[in-house]
């Protein structure tokens, strides 16, 4: 019995015309695009014996004891209906990216005296807005990266820290935190 033959089909084994079905002919198992992009591997005698034992089903290339599949984050569905154009389906992500992009543009162009502080605060507000959208909107599209709780903590904390750093940036900080200067001098000494 050579490579590509199956012990389940003795007639095909006799004339040598048996083939293993390609990935295009295989039924969709719902395992996602990762399997479609994976290169074909050589079928060995152990694989064909496993197929016969499993009732003709092809064995998985994944580690069955470690993971079965990766679940989409909750709220990771489209933010608009399927007939809407692509930008409309991803409006929460676009809102956050456009706000952060406007902040970066203000920082880069530096059109007025406090442009660095205002642009940086706009970037932080964009992240805080992303956390609010993740909390309020049930389906936020690609803004949902991890679980809802993890996204809320990540977006909210990073946004808060960026806004706070913009407020205490030198020279002439807009927010004076009295113990911060002593803390910095203590850690640098």
Image (cartoon, rainbow, N blue to C red):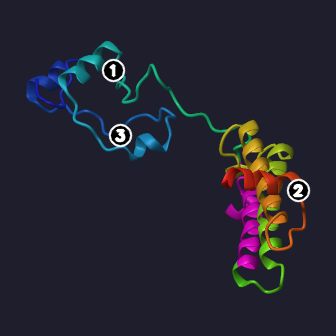
Q: Residue furthest top?
A: 53
Q: CA distance from mark 3 to mark 1?
A: 15 Å
Q: Tell me which label, 2 or 1, sits earlier in the chain.
A: 1
Question: Could you say which is closer to the camera, residue 56 or residue 103?
Answer: 103
Q: Is residue 57 left or right of residue 78?
A: left
Q: CA distance from mark 2 to mark 1?
A: 69 Å
Dot label at residue 56: 1
The magenta stretch is 78-107
Q: Disc 3 designates what residue? A: 23
Residue in view at x 81 percent, y 43 percent: 138
128 inside magenta stretch = no
Q: Quadrant of the C terminus?
A: bottom right
Mark 3, secondary structure of its residue: loop
Q: Main secondary structure of the magenta part?
A: helix
Decide: few, some or many residues near mark 3? Use Cα within 10 Å; few <14, some 14-19, many ≥20: few
> In the picture shown, does residue 82 fall above or below 28?
below
Q: Disc 2 designates what residue? A: 177
> In the picture shown, does residue 54 fall above or below 129?
above
- Image coordinates for residue 29, horizontal then vertical, percent: 48, 32
Residue 81 visible to the viewer: no
Q: Tell me which label, 3 or 1, sits earlier in the chain.
A: 3
Residue in view at x 74 percent, y 66 percent: 100
Q: Quadrant of the N terminus?
A: top left
């Amino acid at each position: 019995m050579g490579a590509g033959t199956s012990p389940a089909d003795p007639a095909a084994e006799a004339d040598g015309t048996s083939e293993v079905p390609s990935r295009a002919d295989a039924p969709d198992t719902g395992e996602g695009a990762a399997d479609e992009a994976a290169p074909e591997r050589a079928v060995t005698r152990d694989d064909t014996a496993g197929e016969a034992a499993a009732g003709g089903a092809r064995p998985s290339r994944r580690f069955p004891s470690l993971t079965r599949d990766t679940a989409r984050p909750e709220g990771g569905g489209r933010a608009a209906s399927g007939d809407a154009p692509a930008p409309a389906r991803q409006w929460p992500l676009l809102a956050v990216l456009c706000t952060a992009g406007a902040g970066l543009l203000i920082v880069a162009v530096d059109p007025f005296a406090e442009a660095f502080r205002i642009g940086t605060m706009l970037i932080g507000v964009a992240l805080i807005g992303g956390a609010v959208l993740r909390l309020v909107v049930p389906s936020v599209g690609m803004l949902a990266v991890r679980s809802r709780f993890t996204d809320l903590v990540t977006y909210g904390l990073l946004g808060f820290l960026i806004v706070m750093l913009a407020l205490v940036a030198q020279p002439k900080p807009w927010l004076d935190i009295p113990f911060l200067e002593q803390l910095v001098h203590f850690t640098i000494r």
